[in-house]
Image (cartoon, coloured by chain):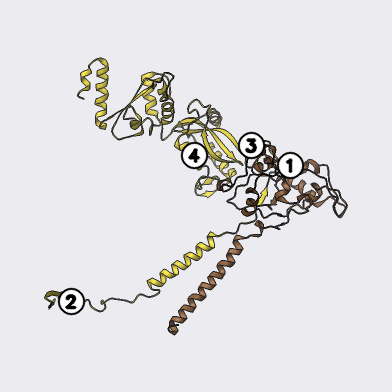
Amino acid sequence: MSETKKHGIQMQHWNPLPAKAENFEEPSGLSRKESLKFMGASSALALGLSGCKRKPVRKIVSATESSEVQKPGKALYYSSTYTEYGVPYGIMVKAVDGRPVKIEGNPEHPLNKGKTTLQMQAGVLSLYDPERLQKPMKGNTEAKWASVDADVAAKLKSSKRTVIVTGVNVGPSAKALLKELSRVAPNLTHVSYDPLQNSEAANLQTKLFGGEGEKVYLPSKAKVVFSVDADLLGSDLRSLEWTRDYAESRGESGDGKLNARWYCAESGMTLTGINADHRLAQKPSNMFSLLRAIRLAIKGQKAALTDY
Amino acid sequence: MFNKAFDRRIHIFLGCFMASATIGVAFGLYALWPPNLETGFEPQQPIEFSHALHAGVDRLADGRQGMGIPCLYCHSEATKGPHATVPPVDTCFKCHSQVEGKGPDGGPHPEIAKIFDAMESKKPIEWVKVNDVADFVYFDHSQHLLAGMDCTECHGDVQNMHRVKRDASLKMKWCLDCHTQAPTEHTSELYARQNLRSAIHCSACHR
């Protein structure tokens, strides 16, 4: 380090860097500037060539046989079902020129009464998913139906036991097919499974209230709805029914009174909490104590509610 | 201008610029004005169907009399939806199951034979679309027919065409020539009674 005094300011000069590092090599090829220029020019060319397309000559291909119902450009509505979390909801599919474009609820279906969930609305996209199976496949290669059928038949004949896994809600036509299959397939076992279903709730409801299967609640008939750490209007598996009835029940009845009063005890803010008339913020660990205190209060020990 | 090296680079740059501009203009002319969207487009169709013979009322040059079939007999969806539709093959078959026609060599007519082929093989006929508009335009035939317009106003004198020819430009400027005017004596009673005007807001056609 050399020191100089200039204008009264002490300056320190560090040792200058060597002219070239020992193992320094000149980079070959294009410099950075030139390579950037080339990249810009080639991308502009590529975009220009691919973006602009001449409109090709269009063909009009009408059917060989005219149909009384299927008219070009006119929508046809088909009723169908969409099984969500093991529950078959009724939907109406709007199809234009044979292509479904929109899903709405079937107003005559007793479960959803014309309403749909997010998954049902997005379900129309699954029909056009580019990764959907379009042809029978064996492993990763395309196969023909005939060969697939032959393979499955051969395996069925040579096996000792067959297990079929279906979703939870198997309709009458599927049931009939399974019955036919059990006649030819040896030792057929049918497993119903849905990765997302309310089986625990259904079992508990059967234990408490009897009857089989899951119960559907109608808050419009209730005076009080109390949700304890249950996002009934949001993430609950039955949120369609809850939300629909909530919307109907919150309207004014003839005498100007609200039909049901909603209470909510939860930790994080949910749709249910924000729509409830009264919300109690509780830690998740406190929920059980809260329920126990309420049970005691109902039995007469109101003091239990003050500390739990 | 300044020195040889700089001049050389400027000339190279200008040369590249002019070349790309020429290519751009040529490509633009190629891409933006395809013949299938211009007046005068008269393509050959898979079947040499003559509107002059079927829809016309005059006597043709070879002596045959035009049959005067109304437009909506075949293009029946024009009043019902956005597309006027080219009829399916069985509309042709309605008459031609009986009408064999005679070809120039005395045998069965080759064009009519194509109808039979289509009906048997269930393969539809791929007609070339003559009166096509750009993909970003939505045109609804039924609205225009309900307003009282006649087919010839836009499609020209189809009754006297052997091969269908694009008569009008069908471009936006041409559409606006009519859309900016008040209703005429053609306008249907439905529209006149409700004092409806033809739409000139953008989303009427550019949906």
- Do the residues marked 4 and 3 share a common chain? no
Quarter of the figure with residue A180: top right
Chain of the residue displaying label 4:
A
- Do the residues marked 1 and 2 share a common chain? no
- The residue that appears at 21% across and 20% down in the rendered structure is A304
Query: What's under tag 4, amino acid-wise?
Result: Gly
Query: What's under tag 1, amino acid-wise?
Result: Leu
Q: Nearer the viewer, mark 2 or mark 4?
A: 2
Circle 3: element type? loop
Quarter of the figure with residue A191: top left
At label 1, counting other C-alpha atoms closer than 10 Å, the crowd grade (few under 14, some 14-19, many 20 or more) is few
Circle 1: element type? helix
Q: Is residue B41 above or below residue A223?
A: below
- The residue that appears at 47% across and 78% down in the rendered structure is B10
Q: Position of residue A128 (x, y in %)?
A: 52, 45
Q: Distance of mark 1 from mark 2, alpha carbons? A: 95 Å
Chain coloured brown in this rendering:
B
Q: Which residue is mark 1?
A: B72
Q: Which residue is mark 2?
A: A15
